[in-house]
Amino acid sequence: MKDGLRHMNSDIGFGAQSRAVYAENPLESRGRLYPETESPTRTPFQRDRDRIIHSSAFRRLKHKTQVFVYHEGDHFRTRLTHTIEVSQIARSLARALRLDEDLAECLALSHDLGHTPFGHEGEDVMHECMAPFGGFDHNAQSLRVVTHLEQRYAEFDGLNLAWETLEGLVKHNGPLIGLDGSPLGKFKNVQLPFAIREYEEKQDLLLKTWPGGEAQAAAIADDIAYDAHDLDDGLRAGLFAVEDMREVPYLAEILSEVDTKYPGLEESRRIHEIVRRSITRMVEDVIREGMRNIAETNPQSAQDIRLAGRCLIGFSSDMAAAEKEVKRFLFSRVYRHHDVLAVRKLVSRVVKDLFQKFHAQPELMPSPWNIGLEDLSETEVARRICDYIAGMTDRYAIEEHRRLFDDTPDLG
């Protein structure tokens, strides 16, 4: 079958000629947990992309908060629009660096599937509620979504994605455990999340290594998209003014460039010029830095990228410092703005109330979530409650709160 797929892919132009030796080759995929007949018209990564797009979790991203809650306006980003923007940037990076574009797109499209309603506030509250039961991590929840919670296929739970997609999804920000087996990064003083530990018993995702180049491209694309659209949304929401951006040298330079070239430009176009130029600068910086790192390490396979011992596709040191200042600006002007904090406080109560109510009376969850509870341990019941709430959209979480409580916050 692989020979037939290889011939078909060559005939209809899957871009094998442009892919570098260090890119993931879909024809040499490590396969799926549950073997399937290969498609004669799509590579494994193209099939994964299509499965992700057609999943229920992907559709729900439309009504999940990025920064601004759903009722605040139709032009602010949601998890879905953010995901699409990350996907576009990831593909651009992959194309320039001769990586597999389809895999990079897969990883971008799936990276936020595990997010709770109400953005990072929802995640923080869920982690607090789940603390006695192993905590909550949205990245681990994304893995749980694509390997267990999506139940669409006759022969298996989850989407049965290719090994390379699952590996990149789990560790796109770097290795999760050290050579001695101890957790790294944010998991350093705690154990790895339940979903990752559970899946590792079924399939080894090489948690000690860096991910392939496509996952690294998707990860940095996430940062680029975040910075750009939070600047855009923050400006359009009136949380800060264009002139306030002069506090950040990187942004001040772009602002001066726009004002010099287009004096008197109307505000909406001025904002767009600033945002798009920031994206372009960051993308071009990653491409230059990625090319430099690749030339320096000279990887001859995707595995060489994993074993390089460091991230090869990211910002240069100068851009990393500039991007850090942008994030600091956004933290003070957007994420900690009193209007945003006021809403965050309200939605925090929604998530906490739902968890506490279902924990006390899990039978109040609708079918099929309330089936077979008597056969589960307390931790397993808590995990099911967590799965149910994490999958909610903002709107559905509010509706569930209204069903169970008489004092649902008014977000308007």
Image (cartoon, rainbow, N blue to C red):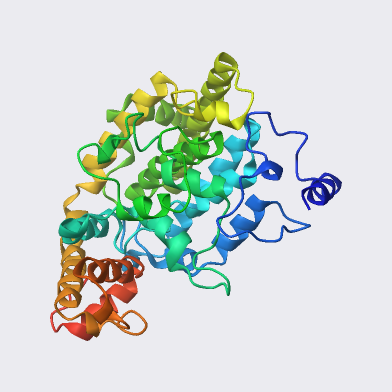
Q: Quadrant of the C terminus?
A: bottom left
- Asked whether 410 or 92 is in front, the reply is 92
Residue 405 located left or right of residue 78: left
Q: Can you give x and y, in whole percent of width and height, for residue 119 in the image?
A: 30, 57
Quadrant housing residue 50: bottom right
- Asked whether 198 or 361 is in front, the reply is 198
Residue at 67 percent across and 44 percent down: it is 26
Quadrant housing residue 390: bottom left
Vertical relation: 373 (above or below) 267? below
Count the marks: how many? Answer: 0
Residue at 26 percent across and 46 percent down: it is 334
Q: Can you give x and y, in whole percent of width and height, for residue 235 in the image?
A: 34, 47
Q: Can you give x and y, in whole percent of width and height, for residue 330 in the image?
A: 28, 40
Q: Can you give x and y, in whole percent of width and height, for residue 299 in the image?
A: 60, 22
Residue at 68 percent across and 29 percent down: it is 20
Asked whether residue 299 is in view, the answer is yes
Asked whether residue 244 is in view, the answer is no
Residue at 59 percent across and 32 percent down: it is 302
Vertical relation: 139 (above or below) 62? above
Residue 170 located left or right of residue 35: left
